[in-house]
């Protein structure tokens, strides 16, 4: 039988544990803020687990285990980014406390399961379990458990098909439209223990149907997401959302509910407060910060209706993994420098192609003298699928579609050594704004020759 550590042995391990948790802080911040620069300001090491943040325009100061840190970014820190930094601190502080609290340590083993990044995401969405080690011992981290279910499901196939699934976690706030779900006596925990059962993957598809999980983390029911979100139909999401997930976003507009979905492409999406908050793709979590990014986009465009329409179309194209590029010029005359004459809508047909069919220019009359805002989103998507860019002026007038952006010898600055669509976005953004959709599902906003943000 092992003997309890003596006071000397405990003190001997103190520097090692502190160094470990300083490294965990660095890794957690680097994971979610890869472009940030973290530096030690100084201080004296202590076992004070307080994690404090103070924000400047593009600089944040942190205090952890008695040491001060400075995190510097090229852009200002948003409210959600500050919230995420706080979530990282809450998880690490709770884990650190568990190591020293012998009474609670045995009850807190589940805190150390899974990926730490999943815990940071969970604490961002629901900080209540991480208020203290005692609070976590009384309530399970049901969001991290649900993420584990989706992670395992993403690596599993059923009848040679990729699995899609999802869950709605009933919130802790008051919801006038739904009563807390009844808890059946035989209700199972919604966690990784469900995934070995093949029949589990037939219960819900994540797109139309979801598992309903109560406050204790138990699977209580199955719901149709559109029907469940019906009472919120009159409420408006704070930003445009993918059409495919309108109901999922509406379902989280009230009550503090959280919706997690594993998509057909193997991506994990998390919705809260009426919008998408996190996405897990290409092996990493990303804070979407959609509200702040949409605000920057809308202010740059200056026309809320045009900004909303283009953002909505870009989201839907990204969901379908279809690439595209929208360019909104500050001055329509710039099109004469960026777009070849035969690609501009003002050009007439230039004869037949080699195969005897009409050239692309022969179809220009279909959209000539039209405004993008007068076109249905499905038509905009169809035009955007054609290789090249859709070029507009600030009044949403169509100037070109399927246009190849030509480099200008007099354009200052080096172009990025990336794909053609990225190069075109950087070049064109020197004359206006560009919204690029990649085939990997990432949307980028470019202005003044640089990438302002990516989702």
Image (spheres, rainbow, N blue to C red):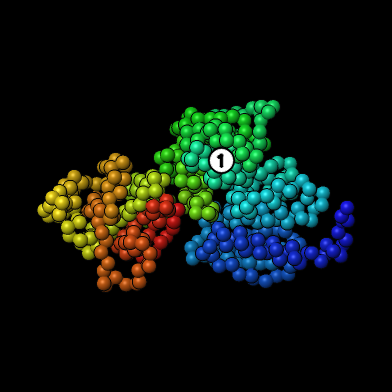
Instruction: Please state the horizontal and vertical placement of residue 59, each as a whole percent of the image.
Output: 55, 65
Measuring 58% from the left and 54% from the top, which residue is drawn there?
A: 84
Question: Which x, y percent locates residue 25?
Answer: 64, 61
Q: From what the image shows, is residue 131 above or below residue 200?
A: below
The residue positioned 44% from the left and 38% from the top of the image is 246
Point 76% across, 67% down: residue:
15
Q: Residue furthest front?
A: 160
Left of 235 or right of it: where is 405?
A: left
Residue at the spot of label 1: 258
Picture coordinates of residue 214, whole percent (x, y): 63, 34
Q: Secondary structure at mark 1?
A: strand
**Does residue 226 appear left or right of residue 173 in this picture?**
left
Query: Label 1: how many residues lie within 10 Å, few (<14), some (14-19) or many (20+)?
Result: many
Please tell me which residue is depicted at 58% across the width and 65% down the height of the picture. Answer: 71
Q: Quadrant of residue 221?
A: top right
**218 left or right, relative to 223:** right
Q: Is residue 391 above or below residue 259?
A: below
Quadrant hosting residue 72: bottom right
Q: Is residue 331 toward the left or the right of residue 198 in the image?
A: left
In this view, the residue in front, 291 or 264, is: 264
- Looking at the image, the residue that sits furthest to the left is 351
């Amino acid at each position: 039988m092992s003997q309890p550590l003596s006071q000397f042995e405990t003190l001997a391990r103190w520097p090692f544990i502190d160094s470990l948790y300083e490294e965990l802080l660095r890794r957690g911040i680097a994971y979610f803020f890869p472009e940030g620069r973290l530096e030690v300001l100084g201080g004296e090491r202590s076992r004070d687990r307080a994690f404090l943040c103070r924000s400047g325009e593009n600089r944040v100061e942190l205090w952890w285990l008695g040491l001060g840190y400075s995190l510097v970014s090229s852009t200002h820190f948003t409210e959600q980014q500050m919230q995420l930094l706080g979530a990282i601190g809450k998880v690490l502080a709770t884990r650190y406390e568990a190591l020293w609290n012998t009474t609670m340590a045995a009850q807190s083993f589940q805190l150390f399961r899974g990926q730490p990044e999943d815990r940071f995401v969970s604490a961002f969405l629901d900080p209540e379990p991480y208020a203290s080690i005692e609070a976590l011992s009384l309530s399970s981290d049901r969001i991290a458990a649900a993420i584990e279910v989706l992670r395992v499901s993403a690596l599993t196939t059923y009848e040679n098909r990729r699995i899609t699934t999802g869950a709605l976690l009933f919130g802790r706030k008051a919801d006038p439209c739904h009563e807390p779900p009844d808890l059946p006596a035989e209700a199972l925990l919604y966690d990784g223990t469900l995934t070995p059962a093949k029949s589990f993957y037939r219960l819900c598809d994540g797109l139309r149907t979801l598992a309903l999980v109560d406050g204790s983390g138990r699977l209580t029911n199955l719901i149709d997401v559109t029907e469940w979100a019906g009472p919120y139909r009159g409420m408006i999401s704070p930003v445009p959302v993918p059409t495919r997930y309108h109901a999922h976003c509406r379902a989280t507009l009230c009550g503090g509910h959280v919706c997690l979905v594993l998509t057909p492409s193997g991506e994990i999406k998390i919705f809260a407060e009426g919008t998408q908050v996190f996405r897990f793709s290409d092996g990493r979590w990303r804070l979407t910060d959609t509200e702040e990014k949409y605000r920057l986009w809308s202010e740059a465009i200056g026309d809320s209706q045009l900004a909303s329409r283009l953002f909505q179309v870009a989201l839907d194209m990204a969901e379908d993994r279809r690439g595209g590029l929208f360019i909104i010029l500050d001055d329509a005359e710039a099109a004469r420098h960026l777009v070849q004459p035969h690609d501009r809508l003002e050009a007439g047909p230039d004869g037949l192609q080699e195969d005897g069919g009409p050239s692309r220019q022969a179809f220009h009359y279909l959209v000539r003298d039209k405004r993008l805002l007068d076109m249905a989103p499905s038509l905009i998507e169809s035009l955007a699928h054609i290789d090249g860019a859709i070029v507009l002026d600030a009044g949403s007038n169509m100037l070109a579609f399927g246009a190849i952006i030509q480099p200008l010898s007099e354009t200052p600055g080096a172009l990025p050594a990336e794909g053609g669509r990225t190069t075109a976005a950087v070049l064109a953004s020197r004359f206006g704004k560009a919204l690029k959709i990649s085939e990997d599902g990432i949307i980028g906003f470019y202005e003044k020759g640089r990438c302002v943000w990516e989702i």
